[in-house]
Structure formats: structure tokens, C-alpha cells
């Protein structure tokens, strides 16, 4: 049986850590220290250092934001649901793992990745994902009625921007991950599924 450890993580060259500019190497080592492993997205995108910096600056601005009503779990739920619509294995697996951890719910990531309308989520979360999916696949038809529906669930205009921006940013990420055949780390598959000992 072939495991992920023996397969390439990208169709493109993956630089060695010691070859990387200091700032990128330091960011990767900090992630490794916190997570216990290096998510493959950091290694594969380091192929182009300037784009790596831009990607993670925008990623962090969206996903680590401290204002607005979206929780960390909400943000990961948006990524998981819309990445599934874009058939992005890497982002569904990686962000699904993070969603399970933030939500403390081992079932929710699989549910929203397959069909958020059947998932055990709140009406607020469902409205958020309805809108995110519309942005993902039908953004030209976003209109006033979408804002009205989101406001019924307590979202303001800044939240609407955040939902759309997360969806749009990960649309880019999904497409690049698919094009380069970015492989999810094996560690992600089990994260958040069973309680820690």
C-alpha cells in the first residue's frame, strides 16, 4: 500500500528549507513548532517566494482577523464547504481538520463538505454557507436579497465582505492546489476526529 509519505506533494519543485529566504524559513519553522509538522501548502508555495509572502499575508488578514462576528470555526467552515464545491482535496482535508478542532465537532467537516443543507449546523451557519456557495459558483447573481437574508441571521455588511473574501481567496487557493496536485499531509486526516488522550 502506498502512503502519502512516498508520493510527491506537488508537480513543481519543492525547495529545501535551507534554500529559502530567512523570513519564509522562519515562518515555516514557526508553523512546524506549533502544529508538530509542516503543512504541505507552505512547502509547495515556497516555490515562488514573492507569491508565498503575498498569499500568506492575505490568508492571515482574512483567517486570523480579530474583528467581526465570524468565529475561527465559521471561517474554516466557509473554506471547507466552498473548497468541496471546487473539488480541492487539499483544502477540504486540511481546513476540515482545522474546522473539527475549532468547532470541537468531529462530524461537521465531513457534513458541510458533502452537503451543508443536510449538516448538523445552525440556521445562522446554514445562511452563511448558502451565501458562500453562491459567491463560489454564482457570484454574478449576488443581490440585495442575499444581504437581507444574511442580516436576518445577524451578519452585517463587514461580515458579508469577510464571507465573500474568504470564499474568493480560497477559490484561488483551490485552483492552484488542483493545478499543482498539492497533496494533503497524512496528519490532517485524523486531526480532530477523536478526543486527545
Image (cartoon, rainbow, N blue to C red):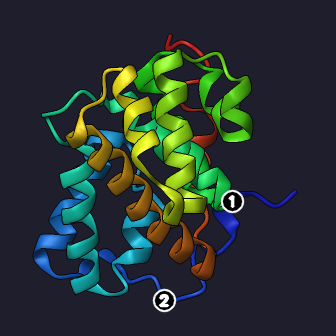
The residues bearing labels 1 and 2 have C-alpha atoms spaced at a distance of 17 Å
Q: Position of residue 162 (x, y in %)?
A: 29, 46
Instruction: Report if residue 20 is visible in the image.
Output: yes
- Any part of residue 187 in sight: no
Q: Is residue 105 left or right of residue 16?
A: right
Extreme residue toward the front, this view: 144
The image quadrant that residue 172 belongs to is: bottom left
Q: Quadrant of the N terminus?
A: bottom right
Please tell me which residue lies in front, 76 or 115: 115
First reached walking from the N terminus: tag 1 or tag 2: 1
Image height check: is 108 above or below 142?
above
Please name the residue shown 13% across and 34% down the image: 67
Task: Please report the residue visible at 33 percent of the width from the left and 27 percent of the height from the top.
Answer: 151
Residue 158 image label? none
Q: How many numbered marks appear?
A: 2
In this picture, residue 194 sits left or right of residue 140: right
Please tell me whether residue 6 is drawn above or below residue 151 in the rendered image. below
Q: Nearer the viewer, residue 196 or 82?
A: 82
**For this rendering, which residue is in front, 155 or 86?**
155
Residue wearing tag 1 = 4
For image coordinates 68% across by 59% down, the residue present is 4
SS label for mark 2: loop
Q: Residue at x 45, y 25 (%)?
A: 101
Q: Which residue is mark 2?
A: 13
Q: Position of residue 36 (x, y in %)?
A: 37, 42
Amino acid at each position: 500500500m502506498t502512503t502519502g509519505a512516498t508520493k510527491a506533494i506537488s508537480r513543481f519543485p519543492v525547495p529545501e528549507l535551507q534554500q529559502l529566504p530567512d523570513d519564509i524559513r522562519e515562518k515555516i519553522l514557526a508553523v512546524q513548532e506549533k502544529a508538530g509538522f509542516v503543512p504541505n501548502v507552505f512547502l509547495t508555495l515556497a516555490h515562488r517566494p514573492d507569491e508565498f509572502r503575498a498569499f500568506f499575508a492575505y490568508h492571515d488578514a482574512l483567517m486570523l482577523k480579530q474583528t467581526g462576528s465570524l468565529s475561527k470555526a465559521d471561517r474554516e467552515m466557509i473554506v471547507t464547504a466552498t473548497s468541496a464545491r471546487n473539488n480541492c482535496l487539499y483544502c477540504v482535508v486540511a481546513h476540515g481538520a482545522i474546522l473539527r478542532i475549532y468547532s470541537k465537532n468531529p462530524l461537521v467537516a465531513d457534513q458541510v463538505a458533502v452537503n451543508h443543507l443536510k449538516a448538523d449546523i445552525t440556521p445562522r451557519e446554514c445562511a452563511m454557507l448558502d451565501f458562500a456557495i453562491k459567491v463560489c459558483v454564482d457570484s454574478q447573481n449576488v443581490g440585495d436579497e442575499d444581504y437581507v437574508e444574511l442580516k436576518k441571521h445577524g451578519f452585517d455588511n463587514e461580515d458579508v465582505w469577510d464571507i465573500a473574501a474568504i470564499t474568493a481567496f480560497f477559490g484561488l487557493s483551490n485552483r492552484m492546489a488542483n493545478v499543482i496536485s498539492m497533496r494533503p499531509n497524512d496528519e490532517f486526516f485524523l486531526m480532530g476526529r477523536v478526543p486527545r488522550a
